């Protein structure tokens, strides 16, 4: 995988689009994923991803762009999980209910529509090569908005991540901040579905952040390293999938997973020395 191979790959327009989309989403995952890991809401992202499948199914049935309704379903499910988990129902129970309901609803609605089976695999496992320049523009806008929010509320999210009770004592609107964070997660999840699919969304959101946290303590540095790692994983995944004709989403996740296990083993050795 040398410069010549990269140049050959970039001759194709769909590969250029895929690479740009992957790099943009690496920034988005680096910003949002760190807060997911720090707040220990990893499985909320997974639940939202599966719940978004209900919106995709409704989009197919009504003949509307599935990703528009996926965004609506993801935001509603994130808000629902946040609201229900503040009651006597535990957060993991709420996630399980919304996850199962969204997937069941999506399967039911897609079975009622025609011609869905061809795209079902792409929604479940992703197809970065099908990303258009319009999708890229949407990703850029979303990334800018979420990054600006994360920077503007940096101190608030920092307190929320490490000591929400201290935040309440300071008078911070902790519940509203958490709801905003969940909405940021929801938008990121829908964009990621296009790249790696519903099944593997959680990996791109958590693996770069988890590796970065093994070596760094400063939040800004963790975010920066997460972004860099995400870009490396996406670029490597595209190169390997192009070379050996493999599914790009799955290849990217396997590379990220291998890096996580290698990093964990290395950090454990450093700790024991």
Image: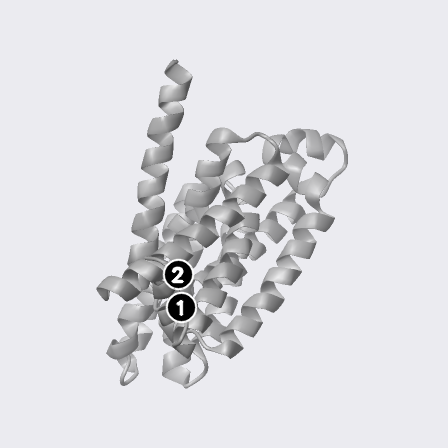
25 relative position to 238: left or right:
right
Q: Residue at x 36, y 47 (%)?
A: 256
What element does badge 2 sit on?
helix
Q: Residue furthest front?
A: 4
Q: Quadrant of residue 161?
A: top right
Examine the rendered structure and indicate whether residue 53 appears above or below residue 184: below
Q: Position of residue 62 (x, y in %)?
A: 41, 84
Name the residue at 27% across, 69% down: 121
Residue placed at 63% from the left, 40% from the top?
Answer: 220
Instruction: For the residues labelled 2 and 1, say whether their Cβ atoms are less than 8 Å apart.
Output: yes
Residue 193 against residue 218 in the figure, above or below: below
The picture places residue 83, in percent across and down from the top left corner, at 55, 50
Q: Residue furthest top?
A: 273
Q: Position of residue 269 (x, y in %)?
A: 36, 21
Which residue is denoted by mark 2 in the rendering?
A: 3
Q: Is residue 57 above or below residue 250?
A: below
Determine if residue 86 is in view: no
Badge 2 crowding class, 10 Å Cα cut-off, few under 14, some 14 to 19, many 20 or more, is: few
Q: Looking at the rendered structure, which numbered label has been put on residue 7?
A: 1
Q: Based on the displayed image, in which of its 4 quarters is residue 211 positioned?
A: top left
Give the class, few, some or many, for how many residues have Cα within 10 Å of label 1's Cα (few <14, many ≥20): few
């Amino acid at each position: 995988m040398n410069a010549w191979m990269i140049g050959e790959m970039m001759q194709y327009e769909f590969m250029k689009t895929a690479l740009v989309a992957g790099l943009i989403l690496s920034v988005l995952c680096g910003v949002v994923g760190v807060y997911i890991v720090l707040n220990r809401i990893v499985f909320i992202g997974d639940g939202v991803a599966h719940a978004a499948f209900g919106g995709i199914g409704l989009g197919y049935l009504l003949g509307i762009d599935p990703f528009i309704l996926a965004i609506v379903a993801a935001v509603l499910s994130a808000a629902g999980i946040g609201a229900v988990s503040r009651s006597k129902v535990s957060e993991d129970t709420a996630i399980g209910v919304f996850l199962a309901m969204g997937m069941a609803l999506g399967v039911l609605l897609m079975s009622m529509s025609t011609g869905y089976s061809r795209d079902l695999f792409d929604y479940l496992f992703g197809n970065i090569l099908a990303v258009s320049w319009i999708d890229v523009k949407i990703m850029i806008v979303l990334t800018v908005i979420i990054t600006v929010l994360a920077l503007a509320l940096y101190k608030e999210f920092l307190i929320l991540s490490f000591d929400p009770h201290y935040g309440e004592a300071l008078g911070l609107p902790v519940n509203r901040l958490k709801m905003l964070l969940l909405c940021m997660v929801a938008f990121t999840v829908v964009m990621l579905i296009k790249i790696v699919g519903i099944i593997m969304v959680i990996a791109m959101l958590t693996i770069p952040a988890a590796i970065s946290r093994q070596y760094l303590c400063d939040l800004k540095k963790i975010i920066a390293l997460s972004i860099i790692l995400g870009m490396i994983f996406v670029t490597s995944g595209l190169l390997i999938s192009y070379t050996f004709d493999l599914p790009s989403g799955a290849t990217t996740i396997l590379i990220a997973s291998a890096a996580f296990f290698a990093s964990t083993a290395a950090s454990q050795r450093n700790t024991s020395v």
